[in-house]
C-alpha cells in the first residue's frame, strides 16, 4: 500500500472530497465529502433524485465528476471508465440488473473477464473459481442456468458473484431490495454481513430506512445533491434519518381516526380468474368493501392480488363469479375501464409506468388520460389544450406535484411525483370505489406521507378503498381490515392491529388458514369447482 | 425429373444461395450486435458496382473483390456512424443508403463507362470462375457419387466456398470466442457490456465492419462471378430476401444457411420450371414461379416459423441513462 506513514488506522476504503456533478442545469452532486471505512457496511440514504445513484456512478466510472478527488485505499485515483473501477477492486450491483437474459450464469459472470480470446479455457477456469467463491460466501447458484429462468433474488446473487469474480473489495449495491421479497432481502443482508466478515467493504444505497437500521455500520444521508450527515447507525434512529432526508419532521405513522363503515359499495362473489396459460390466479374469492373503510390485501407478490384488482377494474375478464358496484351487478362483457370510471370505480394501477402513464407525454396530457372524452377537455374530436393545461396546473398545486410544470415530459418527474399525477387523476373525479395498487412503490418518504394522508382523507370522505400492496407496513398502517392472499385465495382476515409475524405466516401459506375465508360472511355462498389446471404459483421466497 | 436435372437444380441452388448466404451472415453480425441493417441490399449493390468497375479497369478479379469489400465497408461505416455515434434511426439510415446505392451506381456507371449504367463486359480471367481440378473428370465416371461430387462439390467459384465456410466459422466465432460472447451480449443488453468495462461503441463498429466486408463479397460475387459485369439494380431485392432468411432463421448461423438454401432452391426451380408442364396444374405462368420465393417469404414470416425474437437491444441506440 502506498501510505506507509505511521497512521494509527488503515486508510479508508474510499475517500471522496469535493465531488460535484451537474447534468445541464441540474446539480446532481454538490461538493460531496464521504469517507467509507474498510470492512464496513456504509449506507447512503436519500429520497429519489437526491443524487445517490449519480455519486455511485461516478465512483464506478460511469460518469466523470466535474470536480473533486477520489481516493481508493489511500491512493488518489481517476476513474475514467468502468474498467478502471473494476481494476481498482470496485464492483457494483445496479438497481436494474446488468445481465444478459438469454446467457447462462457463467457466461454473464465471464463477460468482460473472459481471460483469453477463445472461451474454452476461460470457461473451465471460471467454473472452478466460481465454485470457490460460492463456497467462501455461501452464494450458491447453478452456473448453467439461463438468467431469464432465475427468480430476481438469484439474479441479484449473480450480480454479486460477477463483482466478486472480478476481485471486488468494495461492493456498491444500488437499491438492492426494491425487487426482493422480505425473506429474500433478509437473505441478502446475511450475505452482506458475511462479505464484511471477509474484509469486503459494502456501500448500500437505499431509500428504505429499515434496511439501513438493520444492516449498516455507518449511514450518510443525502438531500438535494449534498451529504447532510454521516453518523454511526447505532447512534441514530429511523425518525432522525427521515427528518434529515426530507429536511423536516416526517410522520411515519399514519394518523387516522377509527373508520365509520357505511353501506357496502363493492361486493365480490366467488371470483375466479385464469391467466393466459389457463392457470387459475384468483380462486373463488369473495369480499365486501363498505363506504368509509380501507380494505388492505396483503400477500407476497404473485399470489393473485394483481389479477384480482385488474379484474375488478375491468382490465381482465373474470372466469367465474360476479362483482357488484353499489348493489348493481357489473357486466364485464360490455363494460370497459372507461365506462367503469363513469360508474364510479376508479383504479390506480400497480405499475404506473406500464399502465398508469404514458411516460413520453407531457404531464398535462397524462393528467386527463382515460378522462379525455370528458366534455370539459374538448369539443367533439378536438381537445381544448388550454382547458387541459389549466386543469393540470390546478392538480399540480393541489397535489404538490414537483416541479410545477405541466408541460414537462412525465418521464422527467420523480417516482413519487409520477404517482401523485396518477392519484390526482383518479381521485379528483370523486369515485365511490377506489382500487389502489402499490401506491408507494418506488416513492420517497416525503411523498409516501402525502399519498397516505390523501388515501385516508378519501376514506374519511366516505369512499370505499381496496388497497393492494406488497409493503406489509403500508397495509398495516392504512387498512381498517386486512385480507391475506396466498395462492389465489384469501386465506385469512385480520384487523388493523394484526402483528407482522401473524400476517407473515399467513402470507407464506404456513399459518392455520381460516380455510376458504370469505371476507364477509355470505349466506349465498356457493362452492364452485376449483380450477382444472394445477396452480403454478409459488412464493418466490428463499431457496435452500 | 431425372437424376441429372435434379443435380443441375441443386447445383444452381448452391450458386444462387451464395449471395443470399453472404448477405444474411453479414446481417447476422450486425443485428446480433444490436444494429438493424436494412441496408444489406444497398451495400451489396454498391459492392457489385465497385467490383465490376474495379475488375474492368484493373483487369484483376482480386482488385475487384478488394474494391467491392472496401466500398461496402465504407457504406457500413456510414450506417455505423448514423446509428452508433449519432444515435439515429437505424431503419432510416439503412433505407437512405439503399437509395444512395441505387442512384449512385447508375449515375457513376453512365458517367464512367457510358453503357447505360452497366460496367464493361469482363473477360473470363477478370472474373471469379470455378475451375475443375484435373481429377474431376476421372471422378465423373464413378456412378451416382461421381456426378454428385463433380457437379455439386467441385468446380464452383472461390467465393461460393468462402460463403459456405463462413457458416461454421461464424458459429465458432459467435459461440466459442470472446469476441462472439461480447457481440451477442451487446445486442441483448449493451448496459451489461458497458458496466463490464467493455466499449459498446467499439464492439458495434467492429460488427458493422464485418457486415460491410461480407456484403462486399456478396456484391462482388454477383458482379464478377455470377455475371460478367455490373448491371443496373442487379441485386434485385436479394438484400431483403437475405434479411428475411436471417429472421426466418432466428439469427442463428446454421439455420441461416438452410434458409438461404431454401430460397436459392426456389429461385433455381423457378428458372427450371419456366414453361414446364406440371401434372394436374398444367402450365404455370412464369411470373408466378418467379414470385414464389417472395410469396414463400411472406407466408413463412407471417406465421409458420413461430415467434422470431430479435436481439433485445436491436434498433435501439445505446445511451447511458441517468
Image: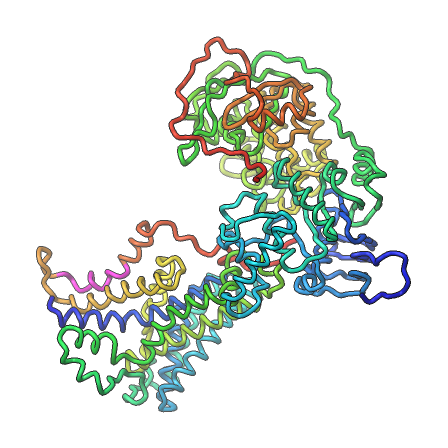
The quarter of the rendered structure image containing the N terminus of chain A is bottom right
Say whether residue A390 is left or right of residue B208.
right
Location of the C terminus of chain A (image quadrant) = top right
Q: How is the image coloured?
A: rainbow
Front residue of this view, candidates A175 and A254: A175
The residue that appears at 83% across and 58% down in the rendered structure is A11
Report the span colored magenta: B284-294
Instruction: Decide which of A109, B70 is in the foreground and name it.
Output: A109
Above or below, B46 relative to A469: below
Q: Residue at x 33, y 79 (%)?
A: B223
A378 w.r.t. B166: above or below: above
Would residue B291 be counted in the magenta stretch? yes
- Give me the residue at 19% from left, 73% from top: B148
Q: Main secondary structure of the magenta part?
A: helix
Residue A419 visible to the viewer? yes
**Is residue B201 placed above or below A521 in the rendered structure?**
below
Q: Is residue A432 magenta?
A: no
Residue drawn at the location 18% of the way across and 81% of the way down: B139
Q: Position of residue B78 (x, y in %)?
A: 51, 71
- In this rendering, would A55 be left or right of A248? left
Q: x and y percent of residue A444 in the render? A: 71, 39
Residue A91, how many percent across, how many down? 68, 56
Quadrant of res A290: top right
Of B224 and A473, nearer the camera is A473
Snapshot quadrant of residue B46 = bottom left
Left or right: residue A541 compared with residue A402: left
Question: In the rendering, at what x and y percent does residue B94 appear?
Answer: 45, 65
Q: Can residue A325 be seen by looking at this rendering?
A: no
Left or right placement of residue B274 versus residue B180 in this view: left
The number of numbered badges drawn on the structure is 0
Amino acid at each position: 500500500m502506498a501510505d506507509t506513514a505511521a497512521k494509527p488506522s488503515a486508510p479508508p476504503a474510499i475517500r471522496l472530497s469535493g465531488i460535484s456533478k451537474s447534468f445541464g442545469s441540474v446539480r446532481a452532486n454538490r461538493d460531496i465529502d464521504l469517507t467509507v471505512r474498510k470492512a464496513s457496511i456504509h449506507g447512503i440514504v436519500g429520497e429519489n433524485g437526491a443524487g445517490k445513484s449519480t455519486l455511485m456512478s461516478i465512483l464506478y466510472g460511469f460518469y466523470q465528476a466535474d470536480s473533486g478527488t477520489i481516493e481508493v485505499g489511500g491512493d488518489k485515483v481517476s476513474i475514467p471508465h468502468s474498467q478502471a473501477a473494476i481494476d481498482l477492486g470496485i464492483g457494483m450491483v445496479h438497481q436494474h440488473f446488468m445481465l444478459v437474459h438469454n446467457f447462462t450464469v457463467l457466461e454473464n459472470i465471464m463477460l468482460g473477464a473472459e481471460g483469453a480470446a477463445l472461451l474454452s479455457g476461460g470457461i473451465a477456469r471460471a467454473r472452478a473459481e466460481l465454485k470457490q467463491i460460492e463456497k467462501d460466501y455461501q452464494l450458491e447458484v447453478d452456473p448453467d442456468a439461463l438468467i431469464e429462468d432465475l427468480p430476481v433474488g438469484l439474479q441479484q446473487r449473480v450480480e454479486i458473484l460477477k463483482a466478486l469474480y472480478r476481485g471486488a473489495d468494495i461492493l456498491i449495491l444500488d437499491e438492492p431490495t426494491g425487487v426482493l421479497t422480505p425473506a429474500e432481502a433478509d437473505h441478502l443482508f446475511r450475505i452482506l454481513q458475511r462479505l464484511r466478515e471477509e474484509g469486503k467493504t459494502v456501500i448500500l444505497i437505499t431509500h428504505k430506512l429499515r434496511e439501513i437500521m438493520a444492516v449498516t455500520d455507518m449511514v450518510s444521508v443525502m438531500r438535494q445533491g449534498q451529504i447532510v450527515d454521516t453518523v454511526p447507525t447505532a447512534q441514530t434512529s429511523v425518525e432522525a434519518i427521515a427528518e434529515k432526508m426530507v429536511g423536516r419532521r416526517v410522520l411515519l405513522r399514519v394518523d387516522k381516526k377509527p373508520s365509520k363503515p357505511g353501506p357496502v359499495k363493492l361486493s365480490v362473489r366467488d371470483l375466479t380468474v385464469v391467466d393466459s396459460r389457463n392457470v387459475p390466479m384468483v380462486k373463488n374469492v369473495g369480499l365486501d368493501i363498505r363506504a368509509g373503510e380501507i380494505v388492505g390485501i396483503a400477500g407476497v407478490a404473485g399470489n393473485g392480488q394483481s389479477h384480482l384488482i385488474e379484474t375488478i377494474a375491468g382490465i381482465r375478464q373474470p372466469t367465474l363469479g360476479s362483482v357488484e358496484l353499489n348493489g348493481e351487478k357489473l357486466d364485464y362483457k360490455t363494460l370497459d375501464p372507461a365506462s367503469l370510471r363513469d360508474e364510479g370505480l376508479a383504479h390506480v394501477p400497480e405499475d404506473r409506468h406500464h399502465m398508469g402513464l404514458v411516460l413520453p407525454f407531457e404531464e398535462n396530457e397524462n393528467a386527463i388520460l382515460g378522462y379525455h372524452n370528458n366534455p370539459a377537455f374538448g369539443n367533439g374530436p378536438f381537445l381544448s389544450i388550454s382547458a387541459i393545461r389549466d386543469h393540470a396546473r390546478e392538480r399540480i398545486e393541489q397535489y404538490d406535484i414537483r416541479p410545477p410544470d405541466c408541460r414537462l415530459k412525465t418521464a422527467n418527474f420523480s417516482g413519487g411525483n409520477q404517482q401523485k399525477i396518477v392519484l390526482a387523476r383518479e381521485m379528483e373525479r370523486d369515485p365511490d370505489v377506489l382500487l389502489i395498487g402499490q401506491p408507494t412503490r418506488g416513492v420517497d418518504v416525503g411523498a409516501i406521507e402525502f399519498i397516505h394522508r390523501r388515501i385516508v382523507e378519501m376514506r374519511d370522505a366516505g369512499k370505499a378503498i381496496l388497497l393492494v400492496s406488497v409493503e406489509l407496513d403500508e397495509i398495516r398502517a392504512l387498512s381498517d381490515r386486512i385480507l391475506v392472499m396466498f395462492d389465489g385465495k384469501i386465506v385469512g382476515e385480520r384487523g388493523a392491529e394484526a402483528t407482522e409475524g401473524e400476517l407473515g405466516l399467513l402470507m407464506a401459506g404456513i399459518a392455520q388458514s381460516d380455510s376458504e375465508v370469505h371476507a364477509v360472511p355470505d349466506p349465498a355462498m356457493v362452492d364452485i369447482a376449483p380450477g382444472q389446471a394445477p396452480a403454478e404459483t409459488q412464493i418466490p421466497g428463499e431457496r435452500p | 425429373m431425372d437424376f441429372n436435372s435434379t443435380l443441375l437444380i441443386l447445383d444452381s441452388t448452391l450458386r444462387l444461395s451464395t449471395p443470399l448466404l453472404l448477405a444474411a451472415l453479414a446481417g447476422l453480425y450486425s443485428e446480433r450486435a444490436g444494429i438493424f441493417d436494412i441496408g444489406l441490399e444497398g451495400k451489396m449493390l454498391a459492392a457489385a458496382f465497385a467490383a465490376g468497375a474495379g475488375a474492368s479497369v484493373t483487369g484483376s478479379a482480386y482488385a475487384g473483390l478488394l474494391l467491392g469489400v472496401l466500398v461496402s465497408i465504407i457504406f457500413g461505416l456510414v450506417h455505423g456512424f448514423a446509428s452508433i455515434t449519432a444515435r439515429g434511426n437505424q431503419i432510416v439510415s439503412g433505407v437512405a443508403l439503399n437509395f444512395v446505392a441505387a442512384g449512385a451506381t447508375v449515375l457513376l456507371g453512365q458517367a464512367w463507362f457510358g453503357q447505360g449504367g452497366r460496367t464493361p463486359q469482363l473477360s473470363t480471367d477478370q472474373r471469379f470462375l470455378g475451375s475443375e481440378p484435373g481429377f474431376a473428370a476421372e471422378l465423373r465416371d464413378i456412378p451416382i457419387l461421381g456426378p454428385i461430387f463433380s457437379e455439386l462439390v467441385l468446380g464452383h467459384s472461390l467465393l461460393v466456398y468462402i460463403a459456405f465456410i463462413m457458416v461454421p466459422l461464424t458459429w465458432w466465432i459467435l459461440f466459442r470466442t470472446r469476441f462472439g460472447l461480447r457481440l451477442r451480449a451487446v445486442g441483448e443488453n449493451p448496459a451489461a457490456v458497458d458496466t463490464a468495462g467493455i466499449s459498446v461503441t467499439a464492439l458495434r463498429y467492429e460488427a458493422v465492419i464485418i457486415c460491410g466486408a461480407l456484403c462486399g463479397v456478396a456484391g462482388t460475387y454477383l458482379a464478377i462471378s455470377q455475371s460478367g459485369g455490373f448491371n443496373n439494380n442487379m441485386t434485385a431485392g436479394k438484400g431483403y430476401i437475405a434479411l428475411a432468411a436471417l429472421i426466418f432463421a432466428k439469427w442463428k448461423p446454421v439455420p441461416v444457411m438452410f434458409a438461404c438454401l431454401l430460397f436459392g432452391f426456389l429461385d433455381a426451380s423457378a428458372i427450371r420450371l419456366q414453361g414446364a408442364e406440371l401434372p394436374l396444374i398444367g402450365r404455370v405462368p412464369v411470373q408466378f414461379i418467379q414470385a414464389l420465393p417472395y410469396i414463400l417469404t411472406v407466408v413463412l414470416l407471417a406465421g409458420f416459423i413461430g415467434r422470431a425474437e430479435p436481439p433485445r437491444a436491436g434498433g435501439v441506440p445505446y445511451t447511458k441513462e441517468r
